[in-house]
Image (cartoon, rainbow, N blue to C red):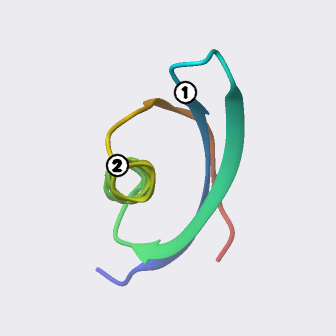
Amino acid sequence: MTDRLWKVTVSSLFPNDNRVESVYEGHHADEAAARDAALTRKAIDNGGSTIDRVQKVEEIG
């Protein structure tokens, strides 16, 4: 199976009730792997201080 390009929109809720949306793009075998990678990336970027949720997933290539 070849990897496909996925675009994942993640919403991060910070402790001060500030919500920020960000987009992750990456090559993964399936949607579940793309979701996991995006959530892992956001956890690393935010230092675990947020509640992160996938809003939308699109296969773009």
**Nearest to N terminus: mark 2 or mark 1:** 1
Q: Is 4 rendered above or below residue 11?
A: below
Quadrant housing the C terminus: bottom right
Instruction: Please report contact status of discs 2 and 1: CB closer than 8 Å, yes or no.
Output: no
What is the secondary structure assignment of the residue under circle 1? loop
Label 1 amino acid?
Phe
What x and y, as percent, mark residue 42?
44, 52
Q: What residue did someone put label 2 on? A: 47
Q: Residue at x 70, y 37 (%)?
A: 20
Label 2 amino acid?
Gly
Q: Is residue 55 left or right of residue 39?
A: right
Which of the pair 9/33 is nearer the observer? 9
Q: Residue at x 35, y 59 (%)?
A: 37
Q: Is residue 6 visible?
A: no
Quadrant in the rendering for residue 28:
bottom left
Q: What residue did someone put label 1 on? A: 14
Q: Is 19 rendered above or below residue 24?
A: above
